[in-house]
Image (spheres, rainbow, N blue to C red):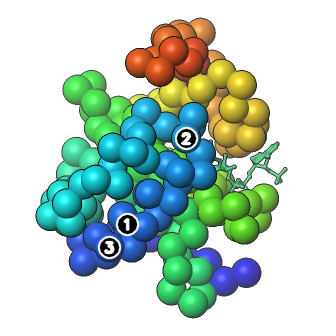
């Protein structure tokens, strides 16, 4: 499988919208955002969002591009006040799963974090999301023993990876 992991470009806001809406519709319980809300965003908002992510300053988004130019996955990060990035929006298109796409996206995020001098990557995973939890553990993330109940009533566990 030909696959290129690279930062999202500001000019790709339409592809970014399609990818993100597909992820929210396909995995409604995996994310804090809701398809029903974001499907109503005007294009200008997607354009602003893609531009902010592409700037790579306090936010970052890596995408996995297939040989035919389609975006088949993404993983991003928000830089927190302590300078360490929090992983967001981890998703692989169903037809591309179990082919190492998510692992490559996380590797790219870890390299990017190291390049900024970050100490660790953190993230929240909904308890019971077995595939995501297995992914993170297999990539070296470990539980911080911190959990919260999110606004949708799901328990989320915090995991972190030392860089
Ligand atoms: C979780 C998710 C991102 C994994 O993406 P992926 O590209 O299929 O993952 P990879 O192929 O890189 O898998 C790497 C490792 O993760 C683990 N893993 C991934 N999917 C798994 C599954 N369904 N069951 C068990 N382990 C799994 C395995 O250890 C795997 O290595 P292996 O294939 O050599 O056994 C994908 O299933 C997804 O998009 N799920 C819905 C959205 C989601 O839950 N996002 C996370 C929000 S916190």
From the top left corner, tell me how far across and down residue 121 is, in percent.
47, 35
Q: Quadrant of the N terminus?
A: bottom right
Q: Which residue is mark 1?
A: 16
- Report how far apart the C-alphas of labels 1 and 2 lie in the structure: 17 Å
Could you classify mark 1 by the number of other residues whose Cα lies within 10 Å: few (under 14), some (14-19), or many (20 or more)?
many
Q: Does residue 27 appear in this view?
A: yes
Judge left or right: residue 80 versus residue 139.
Answer: left
Q: Does 92 sit above or below residue 124?
A: below
| Pick the front one: 131 or 135 | 131
Marked residue nearer the N-terminal end (1 or 2): 1
Could you classify mark 3 by the number of other residues whose Cα lies within 10 Å: few (under 14), some (14-19), or many (20 or more)?
some
Could you tell me which secondary element the residue under label 1 belongs to? helix
Could you tell me which secondary element the residue under label 2 belongs to? loop
Marked residue nearer the N-terminal end (2 or 3): 3
From the top left corner, tell me how far across and down residue 154 is, in percent.
56, 18
The response on whether ligand 1 sits within 8 Å of label 2 is no
Q: Which residue is mark 2?
A: 28
Asked whether the residues under the numbered discs 1 and 2 touch, taking CB atoms below 8 Å apart as contact, a structural biologist would say: no
The residue positioned 51% from the left and 73% from the top of the image is 71
From the top left corner, tell me how far across and down residue 126 is, in percent.
60, 26
Q: Which residue is mark 3?
A: 14
Q: Does 116 sit above or below residue 74?
A: above
Q: Does 26 sit above or below residue 132?
A: below
Asked whether the residues under the numbered discs 2 and 3 touch, taking CB atoms below 8 Å apart as contact, a structural biologist would say: no
Could you classify mark 2 by the number of other residues whose Cα lies within 10 Å: few (under 14), some (14-19), or many (20 or more)?
some
The residue positioned 42% from the left and 67% from the top of the image is 18
């Amino acid at each position: 499988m030909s696959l290129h992991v690279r930062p999202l470009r500001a000019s790709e806001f339409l592809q970014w919208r399609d990818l993100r809406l597909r992820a929210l519709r396909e995995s409604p319980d995996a994310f804090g955002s809701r398809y029903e809300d974001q499907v109503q965003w005007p294009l200008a908002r997607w354009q602003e969002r893609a531009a902010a992510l592409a700037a790579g300053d306090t936010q970052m988004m890596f995408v996995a591009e297939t040989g035919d130019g389609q975006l088949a996955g993404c993983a991003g990060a928000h830089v927190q006040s302590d300078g360490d990035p929090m992983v967001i929006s981890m998703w692989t298109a169903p037809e591309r799963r179990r082919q190492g796409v998510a692992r490559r996206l996380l590797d790219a995020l870890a390299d990017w974090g190291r390049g900024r001098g970050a100490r660790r990557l953190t993230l929240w995973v909904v308890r019971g999301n077995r595939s995501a939890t297995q992914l993170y553990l297999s990539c070296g993330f470990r539980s911080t023993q911190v959990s919260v109940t999110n606004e949708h009533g799901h328990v989320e566990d915090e995991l972190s990876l030392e860089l």
